[in-house]
Every structure is written in structure tokens, then in C-alpha cells.
Image: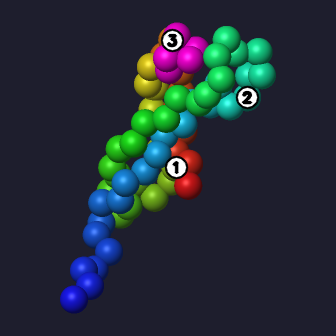
Amino acid sequence: MAKNKGVRIIITLECTECRTNPDKRSAGVSRYTTMKNRRNTTSRLELKKFCPHCNKHTVHREIK
């Protein structure tokens, strides 16, 4: 029997500076996974997280 889609979904957060900066020091993009409540937070989530490629705290935005 299939379960209903829950209210909480798993999302991926990606560094915005790694994606837009071609002169970064290493290849790759920082990504984190987390959960959000789709009823309370309908828009895309933005959090400040540490990016090991940029070596500083940057804005990470939700991607699909």
C-alpha cells in the first residue's frame, strides 16, 4: 500500500557563489540536504552555510 506524500520534504541547498564564480580555487559546488515543511514554507529556502570551496559562510539556495 502506498503512503501519502508527507508534509515534510527533503530539499538540496546549493552555494550561490560557487555556481556564479568561474575563478574559484577548486572544482565543485557545495551542497547540503535538509528538510522543510511545504505547508509553512512554500517559497525557496535560503540559508547561510559554510562552503568548503569558497572557505567562508555563503548563501545557499534551494534547488530542485
Residue 53: say if magenta. yes
* CA neighbours of label 3 inside 10 A, class few (<14), some (14 to 19), many (20+): few
Q: Which residue is at a point 56% across and 55% down the rendered structure image?
A: 64
Q: Which residue is at a point 77% across and 22% down the rendered structure image?
A: 22
Q: Which residue is mark 3?
A: 56
* Percent x, y of residue 35: 33, 49
- Residue furthest toward the front? 27
Distance from disc 3 to disc 1, alpha carbons, whole Å, reads 22 Å
Vertical comparison of 9 with 47: above or below: below
Residues 44 and 55: in front is: 55
Q: Which residue is at a point 70% across and 15% down the rendered structure image?
A: 24
Distance from disc 3 to disc 2, alpha carbons, whole Å, reads 15 Å
- Residue furthest toward the right? 22
Query: Contact (CB < 8 A) between labels 1 and 2?
Result: no
User: How many numbered discs sit on the rendered protein?
Assistant: 3
Q: What is the magenta segment's predominant secondary structure? A: loop
Vertical comparison of 2 with 32: above or below: below
* Percent x, y of residue 31: 49, 35
Instruction: Describe residue 20's horizontal placement relative to residue 10 as left or right.
Output: right
Q: Which residue is mark 2?
A: 20
